[in-house]
Image (cartoon, rainbow, N blue to C red):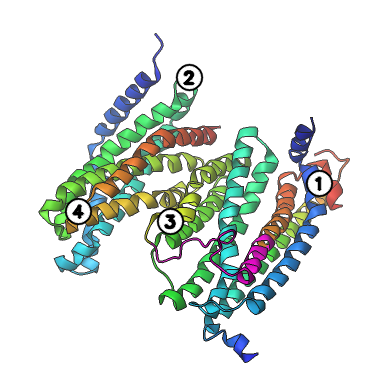
Amino acid sequence: MSEFFAMSGYGQYVWPAFGIGFGIVVLIYITAVGSLAAAKQEARRRLEMNPPGETG
Amino acid sequence: MKTGALEAARLVMVRDLRLAFRKPSQLLQPLMFFMIVATLFPLTLTPELSRLRDAAPGVLWVGALLSSLLALEFLFRDDAQDGTLEQFALSGQSLTWMLFAKTCVHWLLTGLPLALSAPIAAVGLGVPAEAMWSVVASLALGGFALSLIGAISAGLTLGARRGGVLLSLLTLPLAVPILVFGADATQRAITGGEIAPPMYLLGAIAVLGMTLAPLAAAAAVRIGLE
Amino acid sequence: MATWTWFHRFGSPPWVYGFAARWAPWFGGAAVLAMLVALYGGLVLAPPDYQQKDAFRIVYIHAPVATLSMAVYSTMAVAAAVGLIWRMKVAHAAASACAPIGAWFTVATLATGMLWGKPMWGAYWVWDPRLTSELVLLFLYLGYMGLRAGIDDPQKADKASAVLAVVGFVNVPIIRYSVNWWNSLHQPPTRLVGEADMDWSMVWPLLLMLLAFFLYFGWVLLIRLRAELLRRERNASWVREVVA
């Protein structure tokens, strides 16, 4: 098991590489979901301010 | 009498040159900027000519790029502000050719003088006399390619806020191949190597740029004028 | 005919929104599953490399993000071109949605590449053609996003950034082929199928990981695309129905 973490001596490069790589991958997802949530919230806010059926 | 595209381009070229020479002091500014940049490096790096020689290609080309970027802002700005650019676009003449003419003028007034006066800066950077012709040639050719690329980003940033900074940011990625090959040519000239390969590549970029860049710039300008 | 109805549907923001909402979870589920399997295959099952030992395993994160950084730009450029030529709002929205995704993939490429370069070449960074052009790719993404942000008129922003995306596309083949054209520290492309350079047990996790990442790109793109469409079409009635 410790062999697995050592990665034949390269562990200090391999694990951070996967960490940063997949970390960014997760970040891409989080920012995407965040932007969708923000867009929905913005649309709801506008809907409240100008309900349909009213002019303007 | 219907003017052809080439005739319209020629007229634009003559007009731009005439306008530029009305303010000769402005013509010198990009050149002065280049000289100042070239001076900053010996001041901040080292006064030893032998070490400066190693940095010379980079200094000359970065200086040329920065100077070109500075002058690019004025490529379309005045004409855009007073409506001339709009008239060009509406005239029914080929906007592509007219912008190509403007780009050529930009090079004639910035890139070419810079290339011709580069030996002055180069001497201060330890470049040997035998290399001077190659330095001038590579900077002239590369400068032309830079003007072409710059026209695209100048057109794209016409309607943008803080367009000046954005223009530099946009030009940079596209200018990288020109810098890489140009600096390579200058480096080879200094060390006495064969400069033909990078010069051919620079030439190829310039030719490709000549055919495509004015088209892209015209598209960009039309978008900006809408 | 059938192709045209399909094409027209993709021109309709509400239809695309529904399509994206319906399909995104499938892309996501498949992507995560494939990633987990590929990760197990690459980290545990694959034997160590003869020369690089276990350091080669970085390929399982580096190669996918690198491939995606270029694939996303290509998608962005194609979407931009479609938007310019056929004046499709949805295409411009798709291009805009691609940019932050691609930029992050490029950052990931550079970061994982640096962590692989240090043990292999002794340096975190070298100015060789492939690394330099990947860095240039990042500048292109940032320039694209900067141009969009700098132009106030949304339609002008769409068109101007589309021109930039198309012009900048020339960088992608340069990255791809730079290792063939120049003597480079970065290794040349590895043959994966047919006359393979690597053992199959090392290849299949890589291929699966690549597929996983493409599915993942589809997933996040469909999410971001919905956000873009909602923002752009804010006054449309279909938006009211979706959000209420």
Q: What residue is disc 1 on?
A: C239
Magenta stretch, residue numbers? C184-212
**Residue located 48% across and 28% down the image:** B86
Question: x and y percent of residue B162 in the render?
Answer: 47, 49
Distance, label 3 to label 4, CA atoms, is 26 Å
Q: Residue furthest top?
A: B1
> Looking at the image, is mark 4 or mark 2 earlier in the sequence?
2
Q: Residue furthest right?
A: A53
Find numbered disc 2 in the image and state the secondary structure of the residue it sits on.
loop
Find numbered disc 1 in the image and state the secondary structure of the residue it sits on.
helix
Is residue C211 part of the magenta span, yes or no? yes
Distance, label 2 to label 1, CA atoms, is 41 Å
Q: What's under tag 3, amino acid-wise?
A: Asn
Distance, label 3 to label 1, CA atoms, is 49 Å
- What chain is tagged by disc 4? B
Same chain under badges 3 and 4? The reply is no
Q: Nearer the viewer, mark 3 or mark 1?
A: 3
User: With respect to residue B37, does B8 lie above or below?
Assistant: above
Q: What residue is disc 4 on?
A: B189
Tell me the tag on residue B92. 2
Same chain under badges 3 and 1? The reply is yes
Q: Nearer the viewer, mark 3 or mark 4?
A: 3
Distance, label 2 to label 3, CA atoms, is 45 Å
Which quadrant would residue B202 be assigned to in this image? Answer: top left
Q: What's under tag 1, amino acid-wise?
A: Val
Q: Looking at this view, is C56 or B124 the one in front?
A: C56
Question: x and y percent of residue A43 in the render?
Answer: 78, 51
How packed mark 1 is, by other alpha carbons closer than 10 Å (few <14, some 14-19, many 20 or more), is many
Left or right, residue A40 beside residue B64: right
